[in-house]
Image (spheres, rainbow, N blue to C red):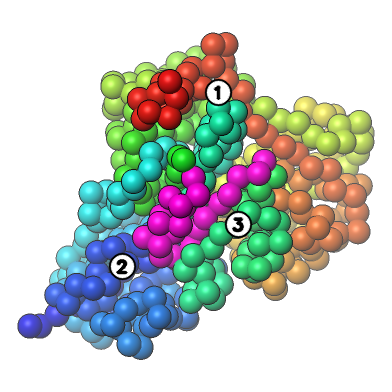
Amino acid sequence: MKREKVIIMGAAGRDFHNFNVCFKNDSRYQVVAFTATQIPYIAGRRYPAVLAGNLYPRGIPIHDEAELEKLLDKYRINQVVFAYSDIGYNEIMHKASRVLARGADFRLIGPDAAMLKSGKPVISVCAVRTGCGKSQISRYIAAVLRGKGITPVVVRHPMPYGDLAKQAVERFSHFEDLSLYHCTIEEREEYEPLLRQGTVVYAGIDYERILLAAEGEGDVIIWDGGNNDFPFFRPDLEITVADPLRSGDETAYFPGEVNLRRAAVVIVNKINAVDAETVRRLEKAVAAVNDQAQIVRTASEITVECADDIRGKRVLVVEDGPSVTHGNLPSGAGLAAAAQFGAAEVIDPRPFASGSLLDTFRSYPHIGPVLPAMGYSDRQREELRMTIEAVPSDMVLSATPIDLASVVRPTKPVCRVFYEIREEKGEPLKSIISSFLTKKGLLP
C-alpha cells in the first residue's frame, strides 16, 4: 500500500504529541518531516528513531518552517498537519494557503483524536493566550488539593528543547532535577514555582508513558497547558483562563477559542490590572461564545522581596520570555512593579541588547522597555547576562518566575517580583474544586 506523505508543522511540542498518538504506528502514513518555528535552535535536528518507532528507523528530520514550500515540492506531500499554538487566524490561514497552493491538504487534528484518557481525575488549566496566568492557577489548585489531603501531580505541556531521546519522560521533584535535564530558562520558569511549593511535575515527549507515571503517584492530575494549546489528556474539569488586558484575543487566536468554547470554568484573571467595565465586557464576550461556563474572577497580585530598595532607583525590568514574545504582551508584572514601588526610571534595554536578543526585539516590535528572559541555549543565556550587565541600571527587577541571579549570575543586585492569584470573596474557584473532588469520590 502506498503511504500518504505527511509534514507536521510544529514548535517542538504539540507536533511530537500528534505524531506519537496519530501517526507513529500507522502504516498508512509516512511522516517525511517536521517543520519548526516560534522556538529557536530546534530546526536542523532529528526526531530520534528511538522515539519515532519501527516505521522510522532513521528518525524524522526537523526543518525550519521557511523551507515548507521546498519540502512540499521535493517530497510531493499529500497533507500537512498544523500542530502548534497561539497563532492569529489571519496568520494560520496564510500558512494554509502556502500548503494548498502546492496542492496538499491542510489538516488540524482535534481533541478527540489527540487526547489520552486517564484512570485518575484530570483538571486541565488552559488559556486563550500565552501569559494569561495559567501557571498561577495551576499552583493555586495544587495548593487547594494538598490542603484537603489529596496529592496532586502536575503534568506540563512539553518544552523538549535539548536531547530529545533523553527527554521522553522527565520527572521534577527537586531543584537538582532542573540541572539533570539541562532545563532552559523557559522550562525553569514553569517548573521552579511548582517545585518551591512541593509539587511533583512531569513533562517530556512521550505522554502515554508520562501519564502512566503520573497516575502512579498522584490522586489528581493537573494538566498545566502551554501557550493557548488544548490538553493532551482528556479533562474531567476543563478550566480556561482569559486576560482582560487583551480583550478580543479570546476569539482571535488558535486554539485559544477552542479552549474557551470547551471550558466548564472560565477564569477572568488580572482583574486588579483593569477597570470594572473592561472586566464586564470580557465576561459578556465569554458568555456570547460559551454561555454554559461558570465565570470566576481572580486578581494577579504582585509582591516583591525588596520593595524598599526599588524607590528612587534606575531599574532594568526582566519579564517572562514567552509572555512578551509570542504572547504579544508589551510588558508584565515587572514593569507594573517598577511603577507600583516607585522606581525613578526604567532603562530601556534595546540599545544594549546582545546577539540573538537583537533578533528577538526585531521579531517582536510590540515589546515595551523590558528585557524578555530568553535562554533557550547556553549562548543565549550568556547574551542575556551580557545585556543585563550593559544596561546602565542600579538594579534588576526580575519578574521571570526563575531565580535569575542563580542562573545568569549578574554582578548588579536582583530584586525578584512574584505574582500569585487571589480569589474574590467566597472563593468560588476553591468551591468548584471541592465540588469536583466530592463528585469524584475523593471528598465526603
| Residue furthest top in the image | 425
Residue 323: % across, % down: 57, 47
Q: Amino acid at mark 1?
A: Thr
- How many marks do you count on the picture? 3
User: Eyeballing the image, is 313 above or below 283?
Assistant: below
**Nearer the observer, 200 or 97:** 200
Q: Amino acid at mark 2?
A: Phe
Q: Residues within 10 Å of mark 2 (few under 14, many from 20)?
A: some
Q: Quadrant of the N terminus?
A: bottom left
Q: Which residue is mark 3?
A: 172
Q: Which residue is mark 1?
A: 298
Which of discs 3 and 1 lies nearer the camera? The answer is: 3
Distance (Cα) linking label 3 and label 1:
28 Å
Q: Residue at x 34, y 40 (%)?
A: 235
Q: Element at badge 2?
A: helix
Q: Which residues are magenta?
A: 197-218
Q: Amino acid at mark 3?
A: Phe
